[in-house]
Amino acid sequence: MNNKKTLNLVLVASLWAIPYSLVSATTLEDAIRQALSSNPDVRVETNELLSRTEEVQQARAGYLPTMDITAGFGYERSDNSSTRAAGFDDRSLTRKEAAINLQQMLFDGYATDSEVARQSARRASAGYRVEGVSQNKALETVSAYLAVLRQQRFVELSGENLEAHKRIYDQVRLRSEAGIGRSSDLEQVRGRRASADASRLADLANLRDAESTYLTLVGDLPRDLEPVPSQQSRLPDSLDAAIEAALAKHPTLRSAQEDVHSAVAQRAAADNSFYPHFNLEVGSTWGEDQDGVTGVDKDVTAMVRMRYNLFSGGRDKARQRQTAHLINEAKEVRNRTYRQVVESLRLSWTAYEATQAQLVSLNQHLISSENTRDAYIQQFNIGKRTLIDLLNTENEVFEAKRAYAEALSDLLNAQYRILVGMGQLLDTINVPVPQGPGTGDEGLKPYAEIAPKTVLASDFIADKQEHGGPGASGTTTDGEKKNN
């Protein structure tokens, strides 16, 4: 980017008291860390990773010997040459038997090697998927965090706008009462004041919506949020550099590559049926009163046994062809992921550059609008500007402030989107990828207790109505006191 400069851009949040809870301020890092530790979508993936880890251990068990013990006791009726030689047509005895067998794989056509490789690749894929989901949830948390700050700022601006319209209304009312103003001007400003109050109430409703989204992601209410720091100094100088970093480290792309490795190992495992299998088998059996003959029988064996399938109805060949198709499928999924990563990063970079350029123009628009408004106030006071001119400039200042605040929020969000696109957000803000199974059932109760509460919209209204200020209700008639 030409003439790139490091900008210290922060979105300043409106602060107010939280009446029922004394808590410390929440930083963006705190919110992301809490979201990753409790969000169910993340914990689904961490448990999948733990499951894949145990599957690797199951595959490695194929290298180790197995030992089995059997025992039996019960009735047996025999009619064979042994019973007839002893003078019995048939004979009933109480049969007793026991056996122990140890089996060690010597060669299984590389089936165990291939299965260990397959499961290890699946575990690696799950690990990258945990990181990818965590990066995405962190970005969603950033967006929700910024949305709360943005709506707080909008509530503050709409309150200021309402106060400005109230001042104009009082001025016009005094003129009307003195007989130097028109009643139509009073009705005009009364309507504009009502519109300003409606805008404030809409912003309060949007603030509550932003709070709900934050609660869903973080698992807690947005309490006294700190400003969001700019990450411009952490971004690469060009889109090419960002794409290069993404292709080297993006967790979703690396997960897709591990899925290819898993499919290749699965293809190798399918070849094991074409090899003979050799096992070392050591065992001992003990029996008493078996096959119609009284007495004890014992034997001990140590054997190397070979098993080799000569024909399976074409199943093994079909399995080979199937796994070859699975490799191609995994590669195409990886190719699709590659395109999606590049597309997402290009969109994020475009939004970043666009909002950077917009901020310069929006800032100039805001300055010019405020200067025009101030000049119109003076001209209105001496009768050189109409009321409609004054009201329009006041509204333009209000819209200019909102547009600048929104663009600043969008710029910060675009910066964090680029970091996620490169797979570097969590490293940048020093938040670790979550591990472990999560809270499970223990996470339901605290969330259920928090869910009905609020620390923003309703408390903000009550506090401002009590103490006055931008959030107080402003729709009053002549001489009417504010409603509490």
Image (cartoon, rainbow, N blue to C red):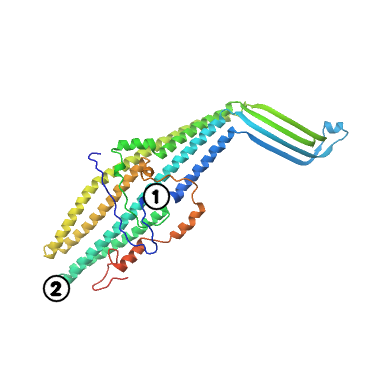
At a point 26% along the width and 55% down the height, the residue shown is 402
Q: State the image coordinates of residue 448 (x, y, percent, origin top left).
A: 46, 58
Question: What's the residue at 69%, 38% (across, down)?
Answer: 69
447 in relation to 128, above or below: below
- Residue 368 image point, x, y percent: 17, 53
Tag 1's secondary structure? helix
> Looking at the rendering, in which quadrant would you find the C terminus?
bottom left
Left or right of residue 407, residue 22 in this image = right
> What's the CA distance linking mark 2 and mark 1?
60 Å
Q: Position of residue 56 (x, y in %)?
A: 53, 37
Labelled disc at residue 179: 2
Relative to residue 11, is residue 35 drawn left or right?
A: right
Quadrant in the rendering for residue 453: bottom left
Residue at image mark 1: 32
Q: Does 395 sit left or right of 149 as displayed?
A: left
Name the quadrant of the N terminus: top left
